[in-house]
């Protein structure tokens, strides 16, 4: 049979029952629309929440940890096997937080092809002096250009220009929570006490708001040089090397490698933030489940309509078979009907889905916890549109397959003799 | 040797539900090219059952059936559909026209399925058949705008579109009034005599049968005269 002939017959059967056809197509359109909207919305939210932590977390962090020596002095005695060792608490002594050979390590990492970028960092424990009170605080010394590039630092600086950190000497970007407590405004001088007892005045050039309030109350940012000055250390004093990789999935493996290579502690993003990945994947799973359920319901609609059409068109099927159309041809015709409902319904579903997500994207959404978000988060990942399209065709094909097989098995003798 | 259009050899058929009844017993006959044959008998004698076996639509029988000298045994459903499309034209008691298509398209459908000629050629041939049957002015109407007699003539035109080896009719005049019956019969006669078309018509209309060239008479599943 020429394909064209099958199409013609399918088309006229469809148009003869255009209202039913429309209802079936609307069913598919509705479910695909909801599928796209749901996934777009859900994943927009996922990306936002992941971004809150994951974007700002280095894929690998190299640092030094002060910990007791694994080789306690008593262990060097060989003759303790028959006696009991009571000495078990030799505390760490004079450990340093800074990474040995930080500068050569950085230049070595910069030439590593797995590495997207590096940002050195050092932290200093301080007290913010507010009148008579001292507030706990941590000042992070950062290289602001690297931070902007790798960790979207600017997104979290809600007021002021972060670039001034390099330009204004002794400048600080205060956490919003800390600033509120200190009643500090941009341009004000604040005073901090370092852990070694020195008092330093710093100029506020901006506010930082991460969306996680506990962080905003404590953390502030200075340039690496300012922080080194606060701590009274030399310019090779770096406590953390933050690495961003080209491929996030390699982080656990590379973190072990770097840890051995440079003889430092290393932690990868997967270990540090495993809970986020779990949350994201379960949310995605739920939205797929809902979307597929909708499509299956639409599939049953198509199945019913095609079944009815077959009962109505029994005579036509019988005569087609009598005049030389094989069961296969009849099956093709009914599958064509089902697929055209699926393709048209699915196409409009994708279009409407895009429309609806765009509308959601415009709805204002303000929350104190997420200062950078002004509207509902939405993802336009083309992958979901592809999945939606494929699902709409696959479900309608399956919904059409059974009625089509039934139609192909109709015995024309029974129909024709029955008249 | 001239190959007969249709040959039945020892065809037998049984219905098994609810009890086994033999409906056709040892059917043997030939129809040569150009013959106008009627198959008659009382209601329930098995003439329609035989026709559907001869038409290849019913494959549940024993014995052998030859169409144009080729055995229909062991042919797949697809191959049988092809045989029906190419070699057999059907006219039933009911017209079985597809209401979604115009008269012309209805006539063209088996031709489009055969796909031997281009669509224009098939359309031209379909118009030709309609003209022969005197209904060419109805070509673009839908079947449900036609009278019963006209519909049956469209069905005849449809059966002719692929120039079949044989036309089979199952009570083609059964639903028609006297006047239209006569018209349809005259058409068959004209086809048989002017176009040398082979026809096998099942009928219980004695008058209709009497006017055919040859009568095959059946009783209780057996042929009693050919």
Image: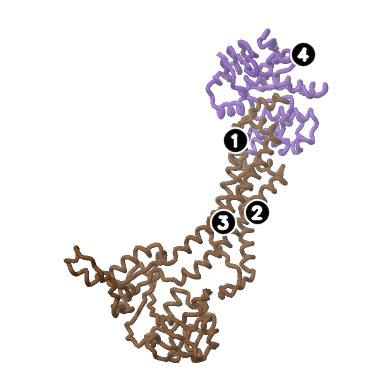
Chain colours: A brown, B purple
Q: Which residue is mark 3?
A: A287
Residue A380, compared with residue A338, is above or below; it is: below
Give the x, y percent position of residue B177. 82, 23
Q: Nearer the viewer, residue A329 or A74?
A: A74
- Asked if residue A83 can be seen in this view, the reply is yes
Q: Nearer the viewer, residue B174 or A304?
A: A304
Q: Which residue is mark 2?
A: A30
Q: Label 4: state its secondary structure.
A: helix
Nearer to us: label 2 or label 1: 2
Residue A45, compared with residue A30, is above or below; it is: below
Tell me, yes or no, whether the two marked residues, 2 and 1, touch with CB atoms within 8 Å. Answer: no
Q: Which residue is mark 4?
A: B206
Nearer to us: label 3 or label 2: 3
Q: Between marks 2 and 4, how big is the CA–CA gap? A: 62 Å
Q: Quarter-wise, where is residue B94 in the image?
A: top right
Q: Label 3: state its secondary structure.
A: helix
| Mark 3 chain | A
Q: Between marks 4 and 3, how big is the CA–CA gap? A: 72 Å
Q: Are marks 3 and 1 on the same chain?
A: yes
């Amino acid at each position: 049979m020429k394909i064209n002939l099958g199409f013609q017959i399918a088309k006229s059967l469809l148009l003869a029952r255009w209202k039913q056809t429309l209802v079936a197509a609307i069913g598919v359109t509705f479910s695909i629309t909801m599928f796209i909207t749901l996934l777009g919305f859900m994943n927009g939210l996922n990306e936002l929440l992941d971004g809150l932590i994951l974007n700002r977390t280095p894929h690998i962090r190299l640092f030094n940890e002060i910990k007791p020596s694994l080789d306690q002095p008593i262990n060097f005695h060989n003759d303790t096997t028959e006696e009991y060792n009571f000495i078990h608490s030799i505390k760490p002594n004079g450990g340093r937080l800074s990474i040995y050979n930080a500068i050569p390590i950085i230049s070595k990492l910069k030439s590593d092809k797995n590495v997207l970028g590096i940002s050195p960092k050092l932290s200093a424990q301080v007290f913010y002096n507010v009148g008579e009170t001292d507030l706990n605080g941590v000042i992070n010394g950062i290289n602001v250009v690297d931070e902007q590039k790798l960790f979207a630092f600017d997104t979290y600086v809600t007021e002021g220009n972060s670039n001034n950190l390099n330009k204004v000497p002794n400048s600080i970007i205060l956490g919003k929570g800390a600033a509120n407590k200190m009643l500090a405004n941009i341009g004000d001088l604040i005073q901090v006490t370092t852990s070694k007892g020195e008092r330093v005045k710093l100029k506020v050039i901006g506010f930082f708001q991460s969306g996680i309030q506990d962080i905003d109350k404590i953390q502030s940012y200075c340039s690496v040089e300012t922080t080194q000055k606060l701590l009274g250390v030399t310019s090779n004093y770096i406590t953390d090397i933050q690495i961003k990789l080209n491929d996030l999935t390699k982080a656990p493996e590379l973190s072990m490698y770097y840890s051995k290579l440079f003889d430092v502690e290393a932690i990868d993003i997967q270990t540090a933030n495993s809970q986020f990945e779990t949350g994201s994947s379960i949310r995605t799973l739920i939205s797929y489940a809902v979307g597929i359920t909708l499509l299956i319901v639409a599939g049953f609609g198509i199945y019913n309509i095609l079944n009815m059409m077959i009962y109505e068109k029994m005579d036509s099927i019988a005569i087609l078979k009598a005049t030389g159309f094989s069961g296969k041809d009849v099956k093709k015709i009914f599958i064509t009907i089902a697929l055209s409902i699926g393709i048209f319904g699915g196409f409009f579903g994708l279009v409407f889905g895009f429309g609806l997500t765009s509308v959601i994207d415009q709805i204002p959404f303000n929350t104190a916890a997420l200062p950078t978000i002004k509207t509902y988060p939405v993802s336009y990942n083309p992958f979901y549109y592809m999945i939606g399209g494929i699902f709409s065709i696959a479900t309608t094909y399956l919904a059409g397959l059974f009625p089509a097989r039934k139609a192909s098995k109709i015995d024309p003798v029974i129909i024709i003799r029955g008249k | 040797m001239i190959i007969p259009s249709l040959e039945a050899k020892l065809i037998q058929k049984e219905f098994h539900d609810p009890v086994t009844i033999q409906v056709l017993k040892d059917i043997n006959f030939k129809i040569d090219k150009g013959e106008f044959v009627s198959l008659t008998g009382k209601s329930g004698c098995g003439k329609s059952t035989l026709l559907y076996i001869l038409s290849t639509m019913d494959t549940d029988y024993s014995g052998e059936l030859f169409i144009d000298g080729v055995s229909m045994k062991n042919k797949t459903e697809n191959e049988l559909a092809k045989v029906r499309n190419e070699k057999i034209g059907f006219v039933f008691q009911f017209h079985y026209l597809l209401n979604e298509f115009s008269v012309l398209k209805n006539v063209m459908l088996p031709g489009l399925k055969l796909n031997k000629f281009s669509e224009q050629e098939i359309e031209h041939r379909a118009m030709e058949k309609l003209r022969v049957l005197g209904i060419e002015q109805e070509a673009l109407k839908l079947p449900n705008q036609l009278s019963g007699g006209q519909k049956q003539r469209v069905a005849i035109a449809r059966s002719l579109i692929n120039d079949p080896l044989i036309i089979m009719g199952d009570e083609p005049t059964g639903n028609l009034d006297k006047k239209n019956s006569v018209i349809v019969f005259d058409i068959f006669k004209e086809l048989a005599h002017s176009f040398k078309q082979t026809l096998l018509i099942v009928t219980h209309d004695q008058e209709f049968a009497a006017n055919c060239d040859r009568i095959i008479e059946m009783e209780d599943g057996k042929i009693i005269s050919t």
